[in-house]
């Protein structure tokens, strides 16, 4: 039996959670479903060209968004959306492997709509990713991000991530310019330590 079998379970098909921002706005967190395709496309259309330079994928491509919606597989990529009514205001993902020497790792990404920043949304979503990761049996979360994105780095630092490495000129932006890559990590559970108090 793998160590992850010891963890509490979560039903991703029924999971959802209501949270409140600093201004009292009620937000719903839930996994992406196929019918979110158009709303997610509209969400990413609002990304500025400057920010799009540093994103891993061409999120303004309708074909890419359609592919994500068509090929949803929570066991490999879990997209968590933050919604205000029918409007998507943040998108986050946990990417993981089911087998191999990295099965215990989860790679995370997040993007928050510009109109909903500085309201605590980023921290709320990341904190929820940590809780979900624990229930999925993930032992360590990893974030790879351009070192220029100080806002996201600060958000992850506040919720317990630490900078594990800085790799100079590791990636290139949309203008083919080299960018330093920061690698941040957070331990979710000490490996094989059943006496650890998780306080979840």
Image: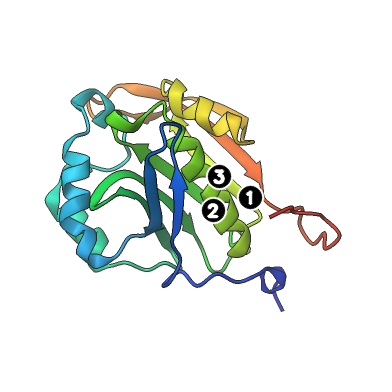
Tag on residue 106? Answer: 2
Which dot marks residue 127?
3
Q: In this view, does 190 lie to the left or right of 73?
A: right
- Can you identify the residue that label 1 sits on? 140
Q: Callout 2: 10 Å neighbours few (<14), some, many (20+)?
A: many
* Foreground of the two, 135 or 22: 22
Circle 1/circle 3 CB separation < 8 Å: no
Q: In which quarter of the image is residue 175?
A: top left
**Cα distance between the residues tagged 1 and 3:** 14 Å
CA distance separating discs 1 and 2: 6 Å
- Image point (14%, 55%), residue name: 63
Asked whether residue 104 is in view, the answer is no
Choose mark 3 or mark 2, whichever is in front: 3
Q: Which residue is drawn at 47% across and 46% down?
A: 108
The quarter holding residue 156 reads top right
Rendered location of residue 165, percent (x, y) = 60, 30
**Crowd tier of the residue under label 1, counting other residues whose Cα lies within 10 Å: few below 14, some 14–19, many 20 or above:** many
Mark nearer the N terminus (1 vs 2): 2
Mark 3 in CB contact with mark 2 (< 8 angstroms): no
> Quadrant location of the C terminus?
bottom right
**Residue 33 seen in the figure:** yes
Q: Where is residue 186 in the image (x, y as percent from the top left)?
A: 64, 42
Q: Which residue is drawn at 29% across and 35% down?
A: 113
Measure how far apart labels 3 and 2 are at the Cα level. 14 Å
């Amino acid at each position: 039996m793998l160590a992850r079998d010891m963890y509490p379970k979560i039903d991703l098909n029924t999971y959802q959670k209501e949270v409140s921002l600093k201004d009292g706005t009620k937000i719903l967190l839930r996994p992406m479903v196929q019918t979110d395709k158009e709303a997610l496309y509209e969400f990413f259309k609002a990304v500025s060209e400057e920010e799009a330079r540093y994103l891993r994928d061409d999120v303004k491509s309708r074909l890419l968004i359609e592919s994500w919606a068509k090929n949803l597989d929570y066991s490999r990529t879990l997209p968590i959306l933050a919604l205000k009514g029918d409007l998507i205001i943040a998108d986050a993902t946990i990417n993981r492997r089911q087998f191999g020497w990295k099965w215990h790792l989860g790679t995370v990404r997040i993007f928050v709509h510009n109109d909903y920043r500085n309201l605590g949304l980023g921290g709320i979503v990341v904190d929820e990713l940590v809780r979900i990761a624990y229930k999925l049996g993930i032992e360590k979360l990893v974030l790879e991000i351009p070192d220029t994105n100080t806002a996201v780095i600060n958000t992850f630092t506040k919720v317990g991530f630490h900078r594990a490495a800085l790799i100079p000129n590791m990636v290139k932006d949309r203008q083919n310019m080299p960018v330093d890559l920061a690698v941040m990590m957070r331990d979710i559970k000490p490996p094989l330590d059943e006496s650890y108090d998780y306080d979840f």
